Image (tube, rainbow, N blue to C red):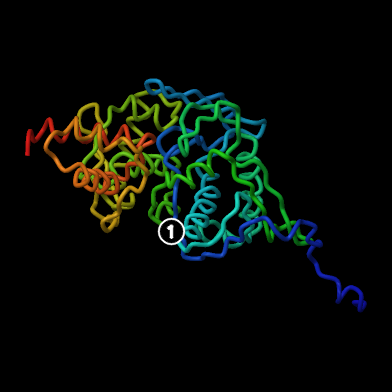
Amino acid sequence: MVSDNTKARSPLLPDRMRQDGFFVCDIFDAAPKGDIGSMEHPVFSISTKPDRNVRRYENGETFVEVVPSVKGLATIYDRDILIFCISQVIGALNEGRAISQTLRFKAYDLLTATNRGTDGRGYEQLRAAFERLSGTRITTNVTTDDVEILDGFGLIDRYRIVRQTREGRMQEIEVHLSDWVMGAINAREVLTLSRNYFRLRKPLERRLYEIARKHCGYKQRWAIGLGKLKDKCGSYSTDKEFKRLVSKIITEDIAHSHIPDYTLRLEGNQAVFYARGTVPAPVEELFEGPLDADAYTEARALAPGWDVRTLEQEWRRWCGKEEIEPKHPTRHYLKFCESWAARRGAP
């Protein structure tokens, strides 16, 4: 017989967390967004087994070092959590709403938004993903919001299960995003992803899509050497095995056209990405970064005879179209003016 006390008692633990100072994720149609920094560099593991290797990636003067916890490196599937969080915050910013570095959301909403299972296994995998995300430490000179953080930092600073059923399933979660991720959000250093990204089965497919989205963008074609592509993917395969894996994905894509927005081909020792024309181009989206007070004076010297205000609009339009977020807008604008004048001469 069930007592009255049992009927009255909720199966949920009491909410012991503060009820303010966080952003509630409730934008159910938020477009998936990925931060450019981790799309550009191999931050996430594409291994299907726990990856406990320390990873260091260098490209020119840029470096990224990723150190795992005992649980292993955060995987490209764990990245879904960051995509969900970034998407929610960007969606709120676009609506003019107040945001916070601490987010609260229902586990079910995250699971459904990222095309994950909502059975017991889905919740177990989600908990493991949070552990890897909070345990993975990064050191890099890649900047977000024009800030370089050389101390070791995590992808998320911490997470808390706010409500949990007696069966152990998460109901509500709080996540405190790292300064690095929040910097990317504040600087709008993010790109929109296809929702079909979450339907890609293979880790390598997801990574190839991220790289194409970052580098091919709206361009019709973008090529990269296979060796460099392997490094950008963070693959531990031999060159021969990596080429075989990419070839298999290409064969499946020819048959099913399942890679979103882009298709991939091997041409000699290069991987060539071709845009399918499905990425929605921004409508006159302009880069809005500020210029220094003396920028126009310097621009007139670099592009004599040209209307520097007109060149500014051309530059802002070009940055918006190509999804370029200059870290130093004035320097970038002046270089644009110089190149413009060199190509076209005097007006």
Residue 20 % position (x, y):
70, 59
Indicate left or right for 130 with 327 as reference: right
Note whether 9 is above or below 90 in the view shown: below
Indicate left or right for 292 with 155 as reference: left
Q: Residue at position x 52%, y 54% from top? A: 84
Q: Residues within 10 Å of mark 1 (few under 14, many from 20)?
A: many
Q: Nearer the viewer, residue 97 or 37?
A: 97
Tell me the quarter of the picture where residue 267 sits: top left
Indicate left or right for 165 with 55 as reference: right
What's under tag 1, amino acid-wise?
Ala
Which residue bears the numbered disc 1?
A: 31
| Quarter the C terminus occupies | top left
Query: In what element is the residue under mark 1?
Result: loop
| Quarter the N terminus occupies | bottom right
Note whether 229 is above or below 9 in the view shown: above
Report the number of discs: 1
Note whether 159 is above or below 58 in the view shown: below
Q: Residue at position x 64%, y 57% from top? A: 104
Residue 341 % position (x, y):
13, 33
Q: Nearer the viewer, residue 112 or 340?
A: 340
Q: Nearer the viewer, residue 345 or 7?
A: 345
Residue 141 % position (x, y):
48, 26
Tell me the quarter of the picture where residue 68 sits: top right
Q: Residue at position x 50%, y 50% from top? A: 83
Residue 316 % position (x, y):
27, 46
